[in-house]
Amino acid sequence: MALLSLDTSQIDLNQFNLNTKDELIPDISIYQEAIDLSEPLDELKMTNMPALAIEVLSPRQSMNDIIAKFQAYFALGIKSCWLVIPAIKSITVYSQPNQHKTFDINDSEVIDEMMDIHLSTQKIFGKSHH
């Protein structure tokens, strides 16, 4: 599996206080167009941006780090960003850096209007055990 990073050389990442030079690596990148992965690559540096970037909050990350990344993603032209927090089974869908809606296991589905995505929360997190 190739590691996909985004080429961010067209913007100055310093404005987002990110400790990276010229690339960002989303946990999951979703493209609306096909990408040629026929050649075996260890690392793929993409100049065209995904439509959707998904970050899964790990214990080592702070929310501020993720929000800073999202600001950079939107500046790069990414349309939608999801923050997945497995510990509390929630997904926050950002349509802009300051516009978001949070869905959790009590919601029947996660809705991303920007991407026209409707996903069952049970399919994402598994069946809830009340």
Image (cartoon, helix red, strand yellow):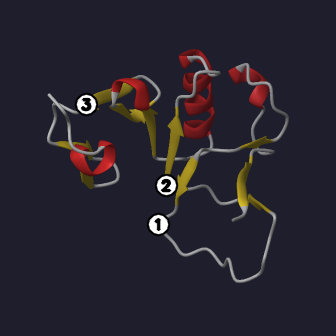
| Residue 49 picture location, percent across and down | 61, 55
| Residue 84 picture location, percent across and down | 43, 34
The residue pinned by badge 3 equals 104
Can you tell which of label 1 and label 3 is closer to the viewer? 3
Amino acid under disc 2: Ala
| Residue 115 picture location, percent across and down | 34, 53
Residue ID at (53%, 38%):
55
Give the mark nearest the N terminus, 2 or 1. 1
Marks 2 & 1, CB-CB < 8 Å contact:
yes
Tally of numbered discs: 3
Above/below status of 119 relative to 2: above
Farthest residue toward the bottom? 38
Residue count near mark 3 (Cα–Cα under 10 Å), binned few <14, some 14–19, many ≥20: some
In this image, 48 relative to 88: left or right? right
Can you tell which of label 2 and label 3 is closer to the viewer? 3
Residue ID at (53%, 47%):
78
The residue pinned by badge 1 equals 32
Q: Between marks 2 and 3, how big is the CA–CA gap? A: 23 Å
Amino acid under disc 1: Gln
